[in-house]
Each structure stands twice: as C-alpha cells, then as structure tokens.
Image (spheres, rainbow, N blue to C red):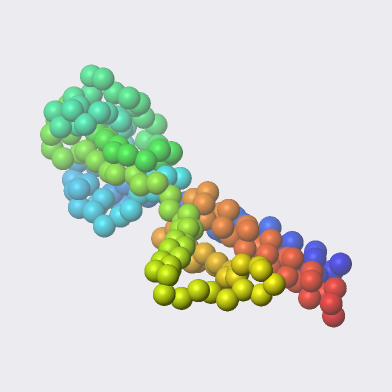
Amino acid sequence: MANIASALLILVLAAPAAYAATTYTVGDSSGWTTVGDYTTWASGKTFTVGDSLLFKYSSTHSVAEVSKDDYDSCSASNTLKTYTDGSSTVPLSTAGQRYFICSTPGHCSGGMKLAITVVAASGTPTTPTTPAPPVDDGSTTPSTTSGLSPTTPSTPVTPPPPSKADNGAASILYNMMLGVFLVFGTTTVALMG
C-alpha cells in the first residue's frame, strides 16, 4: 500500500510540471517603450496557447490590442482591448495572429508595435499507421490449422515522448497517463513481490 501512495504522490507532483506556460516580458528588461525593436524581440520566440505577454510601461504609454488593419495603420480607434495600468498581463488563450500598439499619438508609428503568432499547444501523440496487408496474388495459400484463419500477433504501440517544446493539455494528459501506467506497474510489482 505504501508503494501505491508513493507512486500517486509522484504522479501528483509531476502533473503540474508537465505544462510550464511561459510569461514573456515584452522588450525584456527595457519593457514596452519607444526605443524597443519589437519585431526583433519577437523573432525566434514561439508563443504557444497558454503562454502570456507581460507589458511593463510608464504612464505615458498604453497597450492596445488591435486588428491587423489597425496595426498596419497605427490606428487605435477600434481597439479590441486596452491596458493602461503600467504592468499588463495578456493571456494567449487562442492560436492565431495578435497585434498590439501603443495608443499614444506617434508612438506606434515610431515603432512601438508588436505582432505575434500564437501556435496551438503540441504534444498530441501521433497515431501510428498500420501497413496494408500483403496482396494475395494466388501464388501461395496460407496454411491453417483446424480450419481456423491465421492470426497476426499484435505489437504494443508506444507513443513517442513529447519534445522539450511541448506543452499544453495534450502533454499533461500524456504525462498523467504515463503516471497511471507507472502506478499500475508499481502496484503489480508490489503485489507480485
């Protein structure tokens, strides 16, 4: 019974670590300012559903989430959402393009704008494909015993482990299933021993 409790404790402790969302501080230590190069800052980063952006800025700035057209024209007349508190966290809850500008006149046209692509969380194990059965061209006839059809032994399929870039609900599910298999394996070993 102690082994079961230990295995369950390991599973519970490992589950939160399965998904480590990232909070990106926009502009890093410089924050959201007129001197930032946000195109360069965003390049090379992978923004995933579940991550968030943290905008840190002074009272002379704001963060306005806008459409692509408003981003391109630096227009804050139709903002989707506006932040003005100086430290704004924007959750990235859906995949797709997101556009942010500073609504202070002249700041966006001076480069204070950010466009990112948010990707769906990956980690869903792929389903292996089963090869097509051989074509019977009539040249050979399989032997049968007692009139039974021959059977093919089944091979257990193990999904590939998630990559280091994986996170999200699928990865959590995968790790929890792995933990359950470990618990049952530990329980079986403990009962046999």
Residue 50: image location, x then y, percent: 45, 45
Residue 118: image location, x then y, percent: 34, 44
Q: Is residue 104 visible?
A: no
Q: Give the answer, above or below, for where 113 lies relative to 84.
A: below
Q: Quadrant of residue 174?
A: bottom right
Q: How many marks?
A: 0
Residue 133: image location, x then y, percent: 45, 65
Q: Quadrant of residue 62?
A: top left
Which of the two residues, 59 or 34, is positioned nearer the viewer here? 34
Residue at 39% from the left image edge and 31% from the top image edge: 85
Q: Residue furthest top?
A: 77
Residue 92: image location, x then y, percent: 40, 40
Which of the two residues, 61 or 71, is positioned nearer the viewer here? 71
Q: Quadrant of residue 106?
A: top left
Residue at 48% from the left image edge and 58% from the top image edge: 127
Asked if residue 164 lies left or right of residue 185, the reply is left
Q: Is residue 145 visible?
A: yes
Q: Give the answer, above or below, for where 180 lies relative to 152.
A: above
Q: Quadrant of the C terminus?
A: bottom right
Q: Quadrant of the N terminus?
A: bottom right
Which of the two residues, 133 or 62, is positioned nearer the viewer here? 133
Q: Give the answer, above or below, for where 156 lies relative to 113.
A: below
Residue at 36% from the left image edge and 29% from the top image edge: 83
Asked if residue 171 lies left or right of residue 86, the reply is right
Asked if residue 115 lies left or right of residue 137, the reply is left
